[in-house]
Image (tube, rainbow, N blue to C red):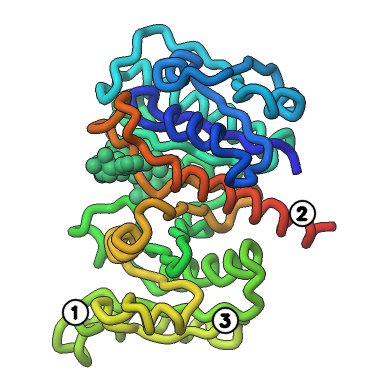
Amino acid sequence: MEPIAIALGDPAGIGAEITAKAYAARQDSALPCIFAIGSRRALEGVWDGPIETIETPCDAREVCARALPLIELELREDIVPGQPTMEGARCALAALESATGLVRSGKAGALVTAPVSKSQLATIGFTHPGQTEFIAERCGVARTSIAMMLTAPTLRTVPVTMHNSIASVPELLTTELVAARIRATARGLTRNFGIERPRIAIAGLNPHAGENGMMGDEEDRIIRPAMDMLAGENMTLFGPLSPDTMFHERARETYDAAVCMYHDQALIPLKTLHFDEGVNLTLGLPIVRTSPDHGTAFDIAGRNMARPDAMIAAIEVAASCARRRALDEA
Ligand SMILES: NC(=O)C1=CN([C@@H]2O[C@H](COP(=O)(O)OP(=O)(O)OC[C@H]3O[C@@H](n4cnc5c(N)ncnc54)[C@H](O)[C@@H]3O)[C@@H](O)[C@H]2O)C=CC1
Ligand SMILES: NCC(=O)COP(=O)(O)O
């Protein structure tokens, strides 16, 4: 497998720190060869280990054993941890763009992205809600064909609507969109985890999954018809389930992934159970892309408090998915 590219994210956040700590733990965690893309200053500000500049991903192979390989991007200002700037957002976007390109061209084996600040990116004219949608566009894949899967040891969840206001969710939910996300989830489970006939639990939108229409009708009007559309495809679907009772331990054993109707319905159970090991895996792309589940953590940036566990898990999941895909394509 080619080296894995890590875009360092916002320089004022914890991206550089968790990347450096993941690199330092590479032997204990048996991580594959990785290289970083971003600002050298961001790394040097939080880590005193060895860093070596490389020109191309293939140089990382030789360097990785002795130093963290870095494709260096210019950052023309000092970094103040916890204080994001427009220049920092430009650097984060340049790293994301460059890393995505290297993976798309096959020079890097998978893409792992450290966290960015979405609002800060918006200040420099970034029009995508998040990195997920940007990467999909760069890969030429429609937003409706991808899915944002959060994966952790005892739970995988996928939100149908992603970075949208709660007020807009009922209007955005359509039968076609729900069906598309369920299909992307099923294919993603087969492609990335080798699950031949995935079992997928579908959440309702309303309390008690609508209580037979008493507390909302999206279950009957939108979600059930979406499940019916997929009848005959290679997956086992059940639901719509009451969202409050589908995440307890015994319930989680009955499915391979839960498709949820909005961001927090999917991410609250995942982060509550597995904050330090949750991985965000984008399904439906021609490349492998993962990210730690957490954000920029500006409140602890530069204080050597950031845990690298989710970044290590993101690298492990990326490597495992890339290996599986390579085997399937061989
Ligand atoms: N993939 C990405 O690029 C993501 C980016 N974000 C961005 O992150 C920013 C901050 O979002 P928040 O909601 O505050 O979430 P957050 O995950 O950055 O922080 C939430 C809490 O968890 C702690 N925390 C997070 N990661 C940690 C780690 N590795 N070790 C120890 N403690 C950790 C933080 O210190 C904070 O107290 C937002 O601007 C958002 O856009 C959020 C999620 C994902
Ligand atoms: N909460 C998940 C999230 O914000 C993912 O963001 P991104 O990876 O799409 O930037």
Which circle's residue, 3 or 2, is located before the other in the chain?
A: 3
**Image coords of residue 215 (percent x, y):** 15, 83
Cα separation, mark 1 vs mark 3, equals: 26 Å
Q: What residue type is labelled 1?
A: Pro
- Residue 273 vertical position relative to residue 281 in the rendered view, above or below: below
Residue that badge 1 annotates: 207
Query: Relative to the observer, which residue lies in front, 59 or 258?
Result: 59
The N terminus sits in image quarter: top right
**Are circles 1 and 3 on residues that touch, CB within 8 Å?**
no
The residue at which mark 3 appears reads as: 235
* Residue 41 in view of the camera: yes
In terms of secondary structure, where does tag 2 sit? helix
Instruction: Provide the residue designation for mark 2.
Output: 326
Q: Return the disc, 2 or 1, that comes first in the chain's sequence.
A: 1
Residue at 30% in and 86% down: 220
Disc 3 packing (10 Å; few <14; some 14–19; many ≥20): many
